[in-house]
Amino acid sequence: MADLEKFRSDTRSWLEANATKSMFGARGGAQEGVWGGKKAVYQDPDRKLWLDVMAEKGWTSPTWPTEYGGGGLSRDEAKILAQEMRALKLPAPLVGFGLTMIGPTLLQYGNEEQKREHLPRICRGEIRWCQGYSEPDAGSDLAALQCKAVDDGDHFLITGTKVWTSYADLSDWIFSLVRSDPNVKKQAGITFILIDMESPGVTVRPIQLISGASPFCETHFENVRVPKANVVGKINGGWTVAKALLGHERNMIADTFGGGAGGRRKTLAEHARQYLLSVDGKLSDPVFRDEIARIELDARAFALTVQRTRDGAKAGHKPGPESSLFKVYGTELNMRRQELMVRIAGPQALGWEGEGFEDDELSLTRDWLRSRGNALEGGSSEIQRNIIAKRVLGLPD
Amino acid sequence: MQLVLTEDQEFIAKTAEDFVAERSPISRVRELRDNADATGFSRELWKEMADLGWAGIPFAEELGGADLGMAEFVTVLEALGRTLAPEPFLSTVLLAGQALRLGGSESQQKEWLPGLIAGEKILALAYQERSSRYDLGSVETEAKPRGDGFLLAGEKIQVLDGHVADAIIVSASTSGGIGLFLVRKGAPGLEITRQTRVDCRNAAIVKLEGVSVAKSDLVGEIGAGGDLLEEVVDLATVGLCAEMLGAMSEALDQTLEHLKTRVQFDVPIGSFQALKHRAADMFIEVELCRSAVMAAARAVDEESEDARKLISLAKARCSEAFVLVTNEAVQMFGGVGMTDEYDIGFYMKRARAAEMTFGDAAWHRDRWARLSGY
């Protein structure tokens, strides 16, 4: 414990001495996180300085081993670092799928060469990654993917289409699942492979959503030559790697929705007061008032359930069955909340752009539309309920 | 607040689960009902439960209690809820017992609590009237000063375990506000009529036709009775939620077992996605209730300023979840779920009664909104 307290004071001093000055207090501001990559544009040059300072220290990925560009910190030390950064209101120096998805997967399944090639460049924010999983004919049934990998000696020739490749237009590399053997059980013929987006034959087209412009893209491969050295895990052994990565992804999504009360700009009641009458502080519309209370109760019960899992983990228990509900309940709760906010705003929630609507009304409408995807991305609610029924409740196939 | 059981709490829970599995099967509830048992619960079993220390959990050691909190008590009540055990925890330990613990004079506590903790005395709290619904402050029963004491007149309904209570604490209006008065069994003018409810839980109509009580029978102060009543019913609500959690968990388990074993169209019906997804939703609701009950119990113990909101959270969610789970259970059991021969119907009936005890879901959402300032 004494060591951890020393680490805390050392960390605080180091941050105070070395963090880019304008970054103190910049956490939670309007500007989105730095994703890095070759195509990165830094509107604020200080963000780049801050990234470089932290990358040099290994603290863009605090718990990764130092030989791969990480900070080599223990979990407890990393928690202290996060607390101190929060206390100084310092923003995360770098975000993205390199840190949250492919990095942890390479640490688990990558070979030494792959780790040395890719991890340091992720830590320094030099390479931005995207994910190539879903296909037009393989959504919930992901293992049905057909993107073809034809053996060509020490290379594969890859042809096919990936959809929902978030930020593919801004990314440098893509981690992908490809069909390397079409003649076996579908899960047994899949390979997990890393593809340089600059390879000849890769094209990217942005996808317009019902909510307007989006980070999603469709990525097409036409006879793209990829070295076999880029296979993570074994050839035809990609399904195992893919499932581990999906676990990282679902945790990330559940974390986004599981925070509960924290960080909301406005409560539902405050939102309602803008549009509905109150008498002596009490909302006059009994139906909306009840619906608001219902969402608040559900949100609190959900946050308490997330807390129960965390408290259990701290006490040394394995994650209980309750953790399987995070994704489905958290996303559906957010969707119900968005829908209620739109209904409370009434006709003022009908704006798409232009005159007659406030900026936050326009984003309310877009957020509601975008939220409809929450129950689809990262494993649909139906898939989540299948998983609960099978793995937790033991119901037969 | 830590939402995880301590080793001691795990031990208490395990003891209770083992006891219930061995000594308190659901068949007991059926027999008590079918025999129209005069007591409506087992005095022997109640004594055994008290000997295990359960009746004394929320009382001080000097009275014979264990001086533990709601976090411990809910583990026992959850276990008892699994088989719908009808022993008088709600009426005696939580309602009347807590009224005496929080508002009773030293002599009242000495007179009643050691016997209660030992499982020898049954107490009840009469707070509900025909027109009061869930409003504890709506009290038509009157207490008028007479001589050195009071004269009580009015009628209370669905007084839990009122038919066997050695004393009943009654809420009554006075010119100075609501007061709580302890009325002894057999007092002249006290008429008790047993009621038969759909959940076959014990309740009685308590009629007071000029019942005279001494000044020393006043529990707490005149005018403070409303606040005391709310505090006591809040504690009992946490206990009831734990019972509901146990009962809905059991109903879910029985339903899952049925889904795995009932074969139609040559396959177990649990393989149908139309049922799987609903079972997953039942599971989710039960898990959220568990978190809410744990949080409410701990908030009470820690005297958190959030406690009242968390209690309403627990009761609102448990009310709806218990009804949902048991409605779905009867549907998934199919025709046999409609027969009295199967136990699942007992759970569905209890769900409805528990929902309507201490405020239903909508009532608690209203309270949550009020406490949240909207």
Image (cartoon, rainbow, N blue to C red):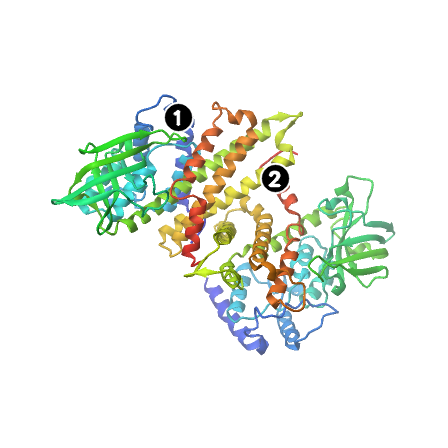
x, y (%) of residue A169? 76, 63
Parent chain of label 2 = B
User: Residue B20 shows which numbered tag?
Assistant: none
Closer to the N terminus: mark 1 or mark 2? 1
Element under disc 2: helix
Nearest the camera: B332 or B68? B332
Residue B314 vs A107, above or below: the answer is above
User: Residue B277 shows which numbered tag?
Assistant: 2
Q: Is the Cβ of the residue at disc 1 closer than 8 Å to that at disc 2? A: no
x, y (%) of residue B131? 34, 41
Nearest the camera: B257 or A314? B257
Which residue sits at x=61%, y=55%? A252
Q: Amino acid at mark 2?
A: His
Whether residue A59 is visible = no
Locate residue A205: give its quadrant: bottom right
x, y (%) of residue B266? 67, 25
Q: Amino acid at mark 1?
A: Arg
Crowding around mark 2 (Cα neighbors within 10 Å: few <14, some 14 to 19, many 20+) is many
Residue B223 vs B152, above or below: the answer is below
Q: CA distance from mark 1 to mark 2?
A: 33 Å
Element under disc 1: helix
Residue where numbered disc 1 is placed: B28
Q: Is residue B187 left or right of residue A311?
A: left
Q: Is residue A90 left or right of residue A126?
A: left
Residue A277 vs B86, above or below: the answer is below
**Nearer the camera: disc 1 or disc 2:** 2
Crowding around mark 1 (Cα neighbors within 10 Å: few <14, some 14 to 19, many 20+) is some
Residue B119 vs A218, above or below: the answer is above
